[in-house]
């Protein structure tokens, strides 16, 4: 093929002439750069390549990372992981070979991306998020994404979402808002983990997290300052009372003194808040994760103390009474998973005690569980963990379910996190009003909080912090 034939086939002369004319009309000070950008915009937007690999999460356990390529560049995403129950959530695909990463490697999920998902998606427009996600769901053909792996599907879904934003030349949070039909971009109230317990720490505290919510801050930046200062005052309080060894941290970065009493932990946090001077501006929350210590119909608050286990059993009624007393004595505005994931009736009772009752293990981001909880008025807030559902589109749909009630929505991290800050943009785009990303320390947690700082700066005078309206950012 001659040069002229090549030019004619691709209509290059006309395209270059159009770009030059556009640069002249714009009176561009850098016509070469202008023409280059103009030509790039003329290129059709399609996924050209998808490449996956195995990386490690914050616990040193394998997870999936994806590079998705379009004509506009490369877009990387990685997925978090928790302690999956497997009953109601989308399934992570792991290799199961005990000789490699103790059975936790994800080479099969990576292979599914590089061979099957890549073949299905190359050539698709990254703006069309729902079509991309549906193509992967159709390819998998299982209810829980067990064929390809929810970890494989979600990594590609997030990477495509990032590519779609760049194709539209809008920030990621704005692209997510467009996908969800949202117009009110809102910076969420952070639920900072300050004390860790349960399965996330090696102390004797039964409940999983004690958190603080700076709802009285005037901006996200101020909320982050409040959280950081409280965390460091708490470290000093703990060191004074238990010594420096009491300042070890759990998987989410929360401090983990060797306490067993919930009240003891709440008292420590209360003292730290007092030292900051933010008393009326900071509220408390607890993630009980009661499923972890439910034994039949009772709850073993000493389940982590082998010498005491069984001596502190509480019935459902005992637990309700305990929550009443705690909410009366401390500024607790949110309780997550106060009972076992199948204990719907007792969970419902907590709505009369606390402003917000959040379903995590109870709901598992599962649409059927959410619909049941809405119908039965079991709780009034959704904890959204995107890897429990498996695609960006499905995450948006369950948030719509919650918004219609209306419920509160908490966008949540996992115990096994990566440096990917996607959930920060997700929380703003969906105007969730709340984000739970761990303590104000550790890089994989701060990646989310720092990205929210970037978003707030970018929005400037248009930045709205949820604050007191953290439950009703609709």
Image (cartoon, rainbow, N blue to C red):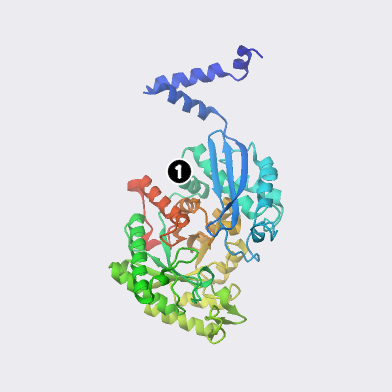
Residue 354 in the image: above or below residue 23: below
Instruction: Say which quarter of the image contains residue 253.
Output: bottom left
Picture coordinates of residue 280 (x, y %)? 31, 69
Residue 322 in the image: above or below residue 410: below
**Farthest left residue in view:** 277
**Element type where label 1 sits in the image:** loop
Instruction: Say which quarter of the image contains residue 334.
Output: bottom left
Between residues 188 and 474, which one lies in front from this camera angle?
A: 188
Between residues 265 and 166, which one lies in front from this camera angle?
A: 265
Residue 358 in the image: above or below residue 312: above
Which corner quadrant holds the C terminus?
A: bottom left
Picture coordinates of residue 70 (x, y %)? 57, 36
Q: Can see residue 184?
A: no
Residue annotated with mark 1: 171
Instruction: Say which quarter of the image contains residue 219.
Output: bottom left
10 Å crowding of disc 1: few (<14), some (14-19), many (20+): some
Residue 245 falls left or right of residue 128: left
Picture coordinates of residue 390 (x, y %)? 61, 55
Residue 435 falls left or right of residue 64: left
Name the residue at 34% across, 46% down.
460
Residue 461 falls left or right of residue 117: left
Residue 447 in the image: above or below residue 332: above
Picture coordinates of residue 386 (x, y %)? 56, 56
Residue 57 falls left or right of residue 458: right
């Amino acid at each position: 093929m001659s040069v002229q034939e090549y030019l004619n086939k691709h209509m290059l002369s006309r395209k270059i002439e159009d770009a030059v004319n556009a640069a002249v009309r714009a009176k561009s000070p850098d016509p070469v750069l202008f023409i280059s950008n103009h030509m790039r915009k003329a290129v059709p937007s399609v996924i050209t390549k998808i490449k996956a690999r195995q990386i490690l999460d914050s616990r040193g356990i394998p997870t999936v990372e994806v590079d998705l390529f379009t004509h506009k560049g490369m877009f990387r995403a990685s997925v978090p992981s928790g302690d999956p129950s497997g009953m109601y959530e989308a399934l992570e695909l792991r290799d199961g070979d005990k000789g490699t990463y103790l059975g936790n490697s994800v080479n099969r999920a990576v292979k599914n991306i590089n061979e099957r998902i890549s073949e299905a998606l190359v050539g698709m427009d990254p703006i069309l998020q729902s079509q991309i996600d549906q193509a992967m769901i159709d390819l998998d053909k299982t209810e829980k994404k067990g064929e390809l792996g929810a970890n494989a599907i979600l990594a590609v879904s997030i990477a495509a979402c990032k590519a779609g934003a760049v194709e539209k030349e809008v920030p990621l949070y704005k692209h997510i808002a467009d996908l969800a039909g949202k117009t009110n971009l809102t910076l969420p109230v952070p639920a900072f983990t300050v004390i860790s317990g349960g399965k996330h720490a090696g102390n004797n505290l039964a409940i999983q997290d004690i958190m603080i919510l700076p709802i009285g801050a005037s901006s996200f930046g101020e909320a982050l300052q409040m959280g950081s200062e409280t965390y460091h005052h708490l470290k000093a309080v703990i060191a004074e009372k238990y010594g420096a060894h009491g300042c070890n941290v759990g998987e989410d970065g929360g401090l983990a003194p060797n306490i067993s009493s919930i009240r003891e932990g709440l008292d420590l946090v209360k003292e730290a808040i007092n030292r900051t001077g933010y008393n009326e501006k900071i509220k408390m929350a607890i993630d009980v994760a009661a499923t972890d210590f439910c034994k039949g119909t009772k709850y073993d608050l000493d389940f982590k103390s082998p010498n005491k286990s069984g001596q502190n059993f509480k019935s459902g009624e005992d637990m309700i009474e305990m929550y009443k007393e705690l909410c009366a004595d401390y500024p607790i505005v949110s309780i997550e998973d106060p009972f076992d994931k199948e204990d719907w009736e007792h969970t419902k009772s907590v709505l009369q005690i606390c402003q917000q009752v959040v379903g995590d293990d109870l709901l598992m981001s599962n649409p059927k569980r959410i619909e049941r909880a809405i119908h039965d008025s079991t709780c009034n807030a959704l904890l959204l963990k995107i890897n429990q559902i498996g695609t960006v589109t499905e995450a948006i749909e369950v948030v719509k379910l919650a918004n219609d009630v209306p419920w509160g929505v908490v966008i949540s991290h996992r115990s096994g996190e990566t440096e990917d800050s996607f959930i920060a943009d997700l929380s703003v785009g969906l105007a969730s009003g709340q984000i739970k990303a761990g303590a104000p320390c550790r890089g994989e947690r701060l990646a989310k909080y720092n990205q929210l700082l970037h978003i707030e700066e970018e929005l400037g005078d248009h930045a709205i912090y949820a604050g007191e309206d953290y439950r009703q950012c609709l």
